Image (cartoon, grey):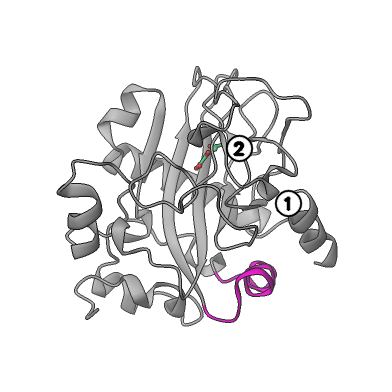
Amino acid sequence: MERCLLNLRVNGWCLVKRVIPTDCVGAIRRAVSETVVTHGNPESLKKGTGFVPGVIAHNQEFAPYLAHPRLMIIARALLGAHVRISFTSAIVNNPGNVRGGWHADWPYNQNNAGHMEAPYPDAVSHLTSLWMLSPFTCENGGTLVQPGSHRSDNNPTGNNGISPDEELPGELQATGSEGDVLVMDSRLWHASAANETTEPRVALAVRYAPWWLNTDVLMPGSDERARLVDEPGATDNVVPGVPKDVFKKLPEDVKPLYRHWVEGRVK
Ligand SMILES: O=C(O)CCC(=O)C(=O)O
């Protein structure tokens, strides 16, 4: 774990091996793939990717691993004791999916209505994890990362002089086996890579936030969303609430990660 934390601090990312046991990951991959077919955003599907925000509302097969001790050690070391899950998305990069643009994730992506204005401070405040339900390879689109870029105070979504579409010196692809989890400082510049195989690359994007990070702009129907997104006609990600009946059945160690996002919560 010390090695992982050092990699996160110095390079902005690390690979956590075997979070989902090898004999369980196939069933989870199939279940998530089915959920994407049933609930996938039609616009994304047209562009070659399957995407389901708030996938935990539809599919809980992976829930037992969300508070995996090694992930919690990392999250708590970097974000403090009171950690939450801010995003749980399914991402399927289908064959033919092309390379995407360099970006840092929410709240550093300057294209989102809810963002931390660049130049932002050099501090970790959000973690992005990509769960490899398929192996990530150079051929099927293992995520492109620019090591060390998390220490920059801006990213290519913020007119920082780097085009989102440029190939960068030092860029590399994060690869791993099914069941492994790529953890990134959300400031790290990263991009999806082309899937040149004939198989979909199935993943989950789970983001971990400290208790103090205001994510209300992501909640449909929230006043924050009305003020920052709906009224000015801006855009941001949507993270649907967790239905109460789903929340009640989550593993006990996972409930604290979602209790701030249960549908109908009192703010
Ligand atoms: O699918 C990938 O490899 C990258 C996904 C990504 O860039 C993101 O979720 O922010």
Return the mark for residue 15. 1
Residue 16: horizontal and vertical position, in percent? 72, 56
Q: Which residues are magenta?
A: 67-82
How many numbered circles does the render carry? 2
Give how far apart the Cα atoms at labels 2 and 1 are. Answer: 15 Å
Q: Quadrant of residue 146?
A: top right
Q: Is residue 220 visible?
A: no
Instruction: Please give left or right for residue 142 compared with residue 82 in the image.
Output: right
Instruction: Please give left or right for residue 182 compared with residue 126 in the image.
Output: right
Question: Crowdedness of circle 1 by 10 Å Cα count: few (<14), some, many (20+)?
Answer: many
Q: Does 79 appear above or below 139?
A: below
Asked if the residue at tag 1 contacts the one at tag 2, i.e. Cβ–Cβ closer than 8 Å, the answer is no
Q: Quadrant of residue 36?
A: top left
Q: Residue at x 45, y 40 (%)?
A: 91
Which residue in the rendered view is the most extreme toward the front? 119
Secondary structure beneath dot 1 equals: strand
Q: Residue at x 57, y 33 (%)?
A: 160
Residue 54: horizontal and vertical position, in percent? 34, 55
The amino acid sitting under disc 1 is Leu
The amino acid sitting under disc 2 is His
Q: Is residue 71 magenta?
A: yes
Q: Nearer the viewer, residue 21 or 84?
A: 84
Q: Residue at x 49, y 21 (%)?
A: 97
Secondary structure beneath dot 2 equals: strand
Prevailing secondary structure class for the magenta stretch in the rendered image = helix
Q: Residue at x 74, y 56 (%)?
A: 8
Residue assigned mark 2 = 190
Residue 11: horizontal and vertical position, in percent? 77, 48
The quadrant of the picture occupied by the C terminus is bottom left
Whether disc 2's CB lies below 8 Å from ligand 1 is answered: yes
